[in-house]
Structures are given as C-alpha cells and as structure tokens.
Amino acid sequence: MRLSAVLFGLVTLALHAANAQTDRRAPPFVQKRRVCITDVKPLSYCDNSTDSTKYTGFSVELFRKLATYNNLTENVDYYFDCVRSSYQKQSLKDPNGTCWSVATGLEIRQENLAEIQYTWPIGRQGLRILIHYDEPQDIWFIFSAFELEVWLAMLGTAFATGIVVWALEECSGKLWVPLEEDSDDEQDDSGLHGEPTVAPKKRTLFKRFMKRAHGVDSDGCYNITWGHVGNLVAVASAAPKYMGPRLVFYAFGFMVLIMITLYTASTAAALTNARLDIKINSLDDLRGKSVITDTDYVDELTKLELVVQALPWEDSADDQTFLNLIVSEQKDAIILDDTWVRYWDAQFCALYAVGPRFNTRNVAFAFSMDTPTSLVDLFSKSILELQKET
C-alpha cells in the first residue's frame, strides 16, 4: 500500500513537472504569424528593402528574445514586417487583420482592452519637448574669455620675458664667480727639498653642498628643479644657466598656469550662458508657440492648454518632416515620444530635448484577440523573469 502511494506520488510529480515545462513553451504554429513593427527609432529600425531578419532596435530584439525563450523561431513561426504606425493598430483591432502582434510596443489604453491583448508592460513611455537652437557662430568666440587689453598684455609679457632672461643671462655670466675646484684632500705638491710650496686647503661643508647643488651635472639640485618647473612653460630644453633668469621663468610659468585656469573657467561659463539663452525650457514656455505633434497626442496636449498642430507620424519619412519644420523655424517645438526625442537630441547638436518627461504611461507588446490567452501569458511571464534578472 505504501509502495503504491509512493509510486502514485512520483507519477503525479512527474506529470506536474511535464505540464509546467509545457506551459513554459508555446506550441509551434501551423502557419507563420506576421509581427508588425514601425520604423520608430530607437525602439525599432526597419525598412521594406532590407531582410526582416536584420531588423533591430530595443523592442525588436526584446521580442526576439522572448519568442526564442518560448520556443518560437523567426521565419518559421513568425516574421517581422515593417508597416505604417496607424496600420498596425487598425490591423490588430480588425478581426480580419493580418498583424498577429505589434512588437514596436503600444500604449496600454483602457478603451482598447476589448480589441487588443496586451502583455505585461515592457517599460514606461512619455512625451518630451524637442526644439532647435543654433548657438551663435562667432569665429572670435575662443578669445572672448579676456578683453583685448589682457591678450595684448600676455603677448607683451611673453616677449618681454625672453628679453629679460637674455639680459640677465648675459649679466650673470660676467658677475658669476664659480666655486673653487680644489680637492677635498690636502695638497701634497713639494718643492725641491720636499717641503710643500702651498698650504693644504679644505672645502667647508657648506661649500661642498653648494658645489653639488649648483653643479653643472644633470643630477644637480639646480638642474633637477629647473627640469620640473621649466617644463611647465616648455623651456626646459633651453635652460638658462644662472639663478636670476630662472627665477624670472618660474614667475612667468606660474602666471601662465593661472591664466590657463582663468581662460578655461571663463570659456566654460560663456558656453553655459549660451545654453541658458534657450527660450523654451518647459511646457509653460510653449504657451502661444507653434507646436507640432502626432495625431494620437492632440487630445491630451489640448487638455494642457497647448495649441498644437497634428501631423501624421508613420515612418522615418515623417521624422524628417517634423525635424525640417523646426530646423527651418516654421515651428517652434515638437512634442513626441520621449525615446524618439532623446534619440534625435543625441544625433544633432542643434536639437535639444528640454523639460522633464510628462504624461507617462505603460507600453507593452500587443496581440490580436484570436491569439490564445495562454501564449500572451507566456510572454508576460517571460517579461517578468527578465525584469527580475536585470
């Protein structure tokens, strides 16, 4: 009896394990399913003239990973197709539509729950402002850190330093009296009768130190100090020989370091001030401005008391239309998805993403209503597992 109970328990556990493993995998499809995506950088990059297996982007690669995890093979069970944005939404809602799934990621809307199945959210999306701003192109901008008088004073100082050092070097050469080169040992020169002709001389400790410090050898303290400090103004190779000229160069090098620091700080401040000249920094600054957006966002932006013009935003050609309108200054700003705005902000220096992200909402993969709920759940479970791993 006990043996039967044990066997029954083992069989039950095996069946549960088999069912659990089956639940983690989707059954192969009889027919390839069409996964629709739109060319919306950086979420998805696609082009009908390119092989669909080469389509990429955050959403596309994530969908591939989830599909592989659930035993679905690209070009066997499903394939990507690049379509217009409005088409993929309509196709999902249409019972006769051919889009099985939308991998670009759609906003989860309460009113669409009866027509579209959503997975667990893959992220949060919001809106942001994109503007065009050309910083003043002044070829003399690099000299704006100092007044003309300061530049002339520095130039004159550089020339004067060379002249002063040369003059001091000439004078020091005539006034400098080198130390005695006598030996540390007693003199033992003898006369004819063996008596010393010169009294022996000893070098004091101070003289020994000064001789070593001012020696002409490369390891003398005098030269080592110059090797470090003179390099600051790139004159170590043309080192003055005497202390006076070198002190002049020490002072000049210190002044140069100070001027470099001041120049860097002043130029950075000027660049910051140029950026602060941007007239649009938030939604409040868009009151009375000419703003363009996608047709899907007109209602929510109107609630924010903004006057916006709706334009179709379907593919990369529409991207250029939007950008050209603000670059040509026909429009003041664009309000579109935050990821799109930040992508173009990174592409061109004259385009700026300003203000914080607003009107955030959840974005998920979407499936048609004829898709088994169990398969949508498998994708959701896989998304949750990936989120836990990261």
Image: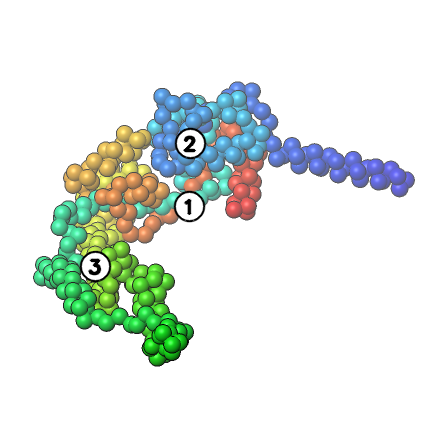
Residue name at image x 35 percent, y 34 percent: 40
Looking at the image, can residue 363 be seen?
A: yes
Cβ atoms at labels 2 and 3 below 8 Å apart: no
Residue name at image x 35 percent, y 42 percent: 339
Crowding near pointer 1: few (<14 within 10 Å), some, many (20+)?
few
**x then y, percent, for residue 329:** 16, 41
Give above or below for 118 relative to 202.
Answer: above
Q: Which residue is mark 3?
A: 263
**Type of residue at label 3?**
Tyr
For the N terminus, the quadrant is top right
Q: Which residue is mark 2?
A: 56
Which of the pair 340/182 is nearer the observer?
Answer: 182
Residue name at image x 27 percent, y 32 percent: 318
Circle 1 — which element? Answer: strand
Q: Which image quarter: residue 298?
A: top left
- The earlier-in-sequence mark between 3 and 1 is 1
Residue 292: image tag:
none
Q: Nearer the viewer, mark 1 or mark 2?
A: 2
Instruction: Locate residue 229 relative to residue 174 in the image: left or right.
Output: right
Instruction: State the colouring used for the structure image.
Output: rainbow
Give above or below for 315 relative to 381.
Answer: above
Measure the alpha-carbon separation of dots 2 and 3.
45 Å
Which of the pair 157/199 is nearer the observer?
Answer: 199
**Type of residue at label 1?**
Arg
Q: Which image quarter: residue 125?
A: top left
Instruction: Locate residue 302 relative to residue 367 in the image: left or right.
Output: left
Q: Which residue is mark 1?
A: 124
Circle 3 — which element? Answer: helix
**x then y, percent, for residue 34:** 46, 24
